[in-house]
Structure formats: C-alpha cells, structure tokens
Image (cartoon, rainbow, N blue to C red):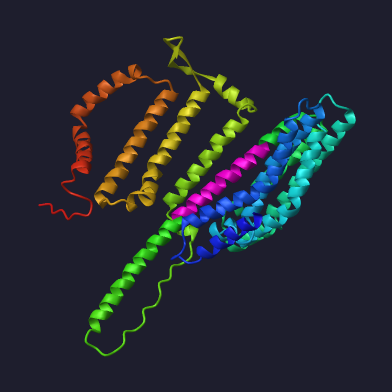
C-alpha cells in the first residue's frame, strides 16, 4: 500500500511537467498520497492507545501510556507529514517549487530528529505524574530538557547562520526582509525552548509541559495553514499559466492562418511553426494584490487559531477586557438596555474589525476578479460592477461590526444621521447624487467600461 502511494506521487510529478497535461487534480492526488504516507505510523500509535483505553480497568500507568502514545502519534503526524512533503518528487519539490536547499535540509534533519523526539515524548509521558515516585519525576524532567535541547539543535541545523537554507537564501536574495532581520527572529525562536529549560530547572516543570503542548499545537496549526496557503497559490498560478498558454495558442493559430493565406496557391511548403512554450511558474510574478490577500488570509487563520489555543493562558487578555475607558456603551443585560463602561478589549476589537475591513475592501475584489469572475460568461462591465459592489458590501458589513463592537446602537447615532442628511441636502447633494448615479449606471449600463464617450 505504501509503495502504491509513492507511485502516485511520482506519477503526479510527471504529469505536471508540461502545461498541456498539468492540472490541479494531480496536486490534490499528491496531497492525498502525502497525507496517507504521513498517517501510516501515527495510526499504529493511535491504535495501541485505543486498545489500552478499552481495557476494563486500566491502571494509572496505562493511562500515562495511552497519553504518551497519543502525543507521540500527533508529533509523528506533524513531523512525518512535513518529511513526506519534502521527499523526492513530493509536494515541496514538484508542486510548491520550494528552494532545493529548503526541502532537502528539512528532509535530512527530520530523518534523525523525528524518532529521537518520539522517544523523548514517550519517556516524558511515562514519567510525568505529580503523585508518582520522585525518581520518575526526575526522569521525566531529564527527558523534557533533552527534548528542548533537541529542538534547539534542529533550529540551528535548519535556520542557524551557517545552515544551508540561510546561506542559500542570502546568496539568492540578500535584500530579503526576512534575511535582514534574521538576527532578531532566529534568537527569538531559540529563546523559547531555552526558556522552557530554565523554567523546568527552576521548578516550573508542569507549567513548562503545558506551554510545550500548546507550542506543539501551534506548530501543527502553522504547518496546516501554510500547506493550504501553498495549495491556494498553486491553484492560482496554474490558472494564470493556463491562461497564458491559451493566449499563446490563439496567437499561434493566427500565425498559421496568416501563413496559409499568404502561401495559398504557392508550391512552397509552409515553414514549421515552433511549439508553444510557457515559462515555469514564477511565484514572484503574481500581482501584489493577490499575494497580499493570500498572505492576509494565512495570517488571519494563524491569529484566530492561536487565539483558541492560547486564550486561557494569556493573562493579558483578562487585563485588556477588564481595563475600562471613560466612555460607555449600550448593552442588553437581562432584557434591559443598560449603559456599561467601554473596555480596552472592545476598542481593540473595533480596531481589528476596521483593519480587516480595510484590507478586505482593498484586496478581495481583485482576487475575486482573478479567481472567479474572469471565467464566467459575463462582460467586462458586469465584472467591474460586481467588484465595485463587493467593496461597498464589505465596507457596510465592516462598519456594522465596528459599531457593534463599540456598542453603538441606532438610537445613539440617529440624530447624527438626521443632521448629516440635512447637511448633505444643502451642501453635498451633488456628490451624493453622483454616487447614486454611479450605482445606477453599474446596474442599467447605458454606457459600459470600454465605451468611447464624446463630450461636447
């Protein structure tokens, strides 16, 4: 079965070489094969854990063994999945077009780091019990410290100043922003396991364990979000490449038709038409708007996911929610509208909604045009109207969410709306009339984008 999945990966890699045979279906098949290969060993650990949990009266040691197998299986799924992504003819090499130094280094390091990490996870799980003998506690602490040292070693092997990934990145693009601040983010990464080592030695072992478990979930979240980001980019770039191929095909057909017309009645043989070639996918050539929108979705997913992972451990969230401002908002309490203090958390939520609304209104119409509208049988005018109305709808929804976060109800602003209506009626009526006329033009389309208009 394992060999079958490997053959599927190699078959998909051969099909995506040419634009004529390339399809996103092969990427999805490769993703499915990679997932199946990644699940092989973790399922064994999950199976043992399930068998032990079905015992009639499992002992305390059995419970620790079950948790150890589950944690080891989760870690194997994360690290093993990344290793399978970086295998030869895998997703990283053929579909995502990662740098060769990146996927080779990750695959090489994970070959020895994964079994060592799994062994240490099991040692930690079997010897971590607050009511157990002190000798077991010492073994668990030593195993945890060993795991943190292993993480530090892996970080230096992958992203240290002398690692292949960093040296190659600096040679290819020395002005890359991530390379310029390498001296900041790399020590920050190393600081996390080093701090957990210090806290364990200082007697905060169980707190360090809880933080390490959340870090494991965070790493899994980052990997999942990044893989889906790569799949989305692969789909977009393939779509763009297919469009370029179709344009070149039309140009070639026009050249052939012209040659046939010119050579009609001539005994000369027509010259051969060179085959159509389309450049390989270059991720840097995609418009900034689409790349920014995809990156925005990636970071939003990380932010939301990390909030669910860490929210019960972050005391700063309670501080923000309990810090009141010298303002009040309307809130329904027991069916009665009451005035309650506005908190710093409410203000932060409103600012976040405003920031997201601004980014979505600016970027979402562009990616909607690129990924969907241009493939529908509609005119350019309809596409433009749809994009414009999408911006208006996003802005309206964003303002509603901002007002709700700040506790601003219709009763609080209806006097302001009435005053603005009077002001618009006297001073800004032409601007409002032009705006409304523009919306009417988008729907009725007496003139369209691209029409020639003569002004007398």
Relative vertical location of residue 250 with respect to residue 193 in this rendering, above or below: below
Q: Looking at this rendering, what residue extends furthest in the bottom direction?
A: 267
Q: Looking at this rendering, what residue extends furthest in the front direction?
A: 56
Residue closest to the eye, 202 or 66: 66
Q: Quadrant of residue 175?
A: bottom right
Residue 174: tell me if it is visible. Answer: no
Q: Which residues are magenta?
A: 215-236
Relative vertical location of residue 200 with respect to residue 178 in this rendering, above or below: above
Q: Is residue 439 magenta?
A: no
Residue 274: x and y, percent? 39, 77
Position of 253 compared to 440: left or right?
right
Residue found at x 31% / y 87%: 269
Residue found at x 44% / y 23%: 406
Q: Quadrant of residue 109?
A: bottom right
Q: Quadrant of the N terminus?
A: bottom right
Residue closest to the eye, 340 or 252: 252
Q: Is residue 229 magenta?
A: yes
Residue 157: x and y, percent? 72, 54
Residue found at x 12% / y 52%: 455
Position of 29 compared to 418: left or right?
right
How many circles with numbers are drawn on the protein?
0
Magenta segment, principal secondary structure? helix
Relative vertical location of residue 240 with respect to residue 46 in this rendering, above or below: below
């Amino acid at each position: 079965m394992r060999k079958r999945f490997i053959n599927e990966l190699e078959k998909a890699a051969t099909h995506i070489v040419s634009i004529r045979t390339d399809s996103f279906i092969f990427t999805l098949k490769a993703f499915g094969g990679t997932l199946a290969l990644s699940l092989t060993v973790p399922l064994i650990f999950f199976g043992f854990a399930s068998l032990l949990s079905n015992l009639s009266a499992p002992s305390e040691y059995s419970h620790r063994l079950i948790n150890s197998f589950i944690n080891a299986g989760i870690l194997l799924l994360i690290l093993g999945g990344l290793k399978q992504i970086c295998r030869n003819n895998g997703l990283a090499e053929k579909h995502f077009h990662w740098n060769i130094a990146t996927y080779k280094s990750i695959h090489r390091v994970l070959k020895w780091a994964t079994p060592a990490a799994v062994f240490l996870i099991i040692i930690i799980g079997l010897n971590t019990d607050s009511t157990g003998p002190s000798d077991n506690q010492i073994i668990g602490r030593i195993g945890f410290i060993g795991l943190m040292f292993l993480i530090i070693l892996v970080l230096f092997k992958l992203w240290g100043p002398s690692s292949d990934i960093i040296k190659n990145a600096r040679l290819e693009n020395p002005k890359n922003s991530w390379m310029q601040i390498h001296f900041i983010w790399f020590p920050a990464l190393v600081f996390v396991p080093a701090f957990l080592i210090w806290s364990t030695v200082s007697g905060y072992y169980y707190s360090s364990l809880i933080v390490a478990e959340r870090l494991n979930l965070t790493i899994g979240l980052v990997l999942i979000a990044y893989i889906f980001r790569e799949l989305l980019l692969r789909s977009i770039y393939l779509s763009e490449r297919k469009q370029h191929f179709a344009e070149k095909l039309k140009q070639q057909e026009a050249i052939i038709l012209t040659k046939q017309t010119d050579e009609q009645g001539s005994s000369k043989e027509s010259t051969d038409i060179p085959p159509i070639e389309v450049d390989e996918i270059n991720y840097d050539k995609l418009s900034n708007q689409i790349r920014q929108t995809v990156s925005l979705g990636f970071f939003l997913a990380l932010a939301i996911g990390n909030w669910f992972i860490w929210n019960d451990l972050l005391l700063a969230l309670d501080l923000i929610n309990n810090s009141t401002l010298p303002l009040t908002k309307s809130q329904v309490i027991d069916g009665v509208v009451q005035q309650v203090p506005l908190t710093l958390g409410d203000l932060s939520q409103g600012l976040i909604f405003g920031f997201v609304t601004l980014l979505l209104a600016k970027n979402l119409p562009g990616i909607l045009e690129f990924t969907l509208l241009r493939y529908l049988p509609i005119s350019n005018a309809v596409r433009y109207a749809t994009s414009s109305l999408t911006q208006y709808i996003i802005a309206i929804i964003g303002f509603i969410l901002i007002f709700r976060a700040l506790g601003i109800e219709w009763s609080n602003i209806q006097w302001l709306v009435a005053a603005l209506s009077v002001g618009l009626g006297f001073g800004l009526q032409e601007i409002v009339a032009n705006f409304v006329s523009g919306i009417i033009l988008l729907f009725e389309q007496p003139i369209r984008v691209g029409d020639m208009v003569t002004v007398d």
